[in-house]
Image (cartoon, grey):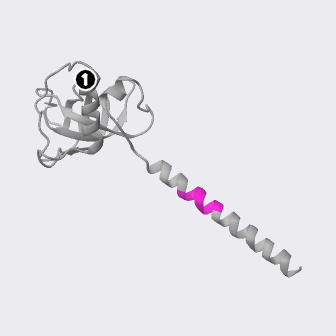
Amino acid sequence: MTPRQRRLGLLLAALLCGGAALTLVLSAFRSNLVFFFSPSQIAAREAPLARAFRLGGLVVPGSITREGGTLTIRFVVTDTRHDVPVIYRGLLPDLFREGKGVVARGTLDANGTFVASEVLAKHDENYMPPEAAAALKRAANDGAVTQKVQR
């Protein structure tokens, strides 16, 4: 084998290994990627049914109900234009309140209910996740407000 053939073989092997590593990294990235959707986007059927994603908006006042004796909580998230019912089993953050911002991670079931596996609440009056703030602003600018929600 000539030195030129050896260099070509090493180059091809390096390219093959690099391609395999890149494929593994991209597939791991894709499987861990979680998108954000607003209630309006869910109503427009832009959210996936089979994949986990984040839902953000405001908790509708008067919508929080607890199932007696269990950790199951139901509430409604809105972007002031559309509402999405949410069911969550677990402990809620201390700052979780009606009329306040929330981001929930989970999946959408066939009935249109968001089944949350994690619920995050904003930590003070000045903070809201950028995606949630942008979705609320878009919903307010797109048309008439369907519900008045305390901010």
Give the position of the N terminus as an image quadrant.
bottom right
Q: Within the magenta stretch, is there residue 47?
A: no
Does 83 sit left or right of 106 as displayed? Answer: left
Q: Which residue is mark 1?
A: 81
Which residue is drawn at the image coordinates 12% and 34% (left, top)? 151
| Kind of residue at disc 1 | Arg
Which residue is drawn at the image coordinates 12% and 33% (left, top)? 99
For mark 1, does the 10 Å Cα neighbourhood hold few (<14), some (14 to 19), or many (20 or more) residues? many
Does 123 sit left or right of 4 as displayed? Answer: left
Q: Residue furthest front?
A: 141
Magenta part of the protein: which range?
19-25
The image shows residue 150, relative to residue 18, as above or below, that is above
Find residue 124 and report its horizontal and vertical position in percent. 12, 48
Res. 63 in view: yes
Does 94 sit left or right of 11 as displayed? Answer: left
Q: Residue furthest right?
A: 1
Q: Which sits in the foreground, 106 or 6? A: 6
Q: Secondary structure at mark 1?
A: loop
Which residue is drawn at the image coordinates 54% and 52% (left, top)? 27
Q: Which sits in the foreground, 11 or 54? A: 11
Q: Which sits in the foreground, 7 or 73? A: 7
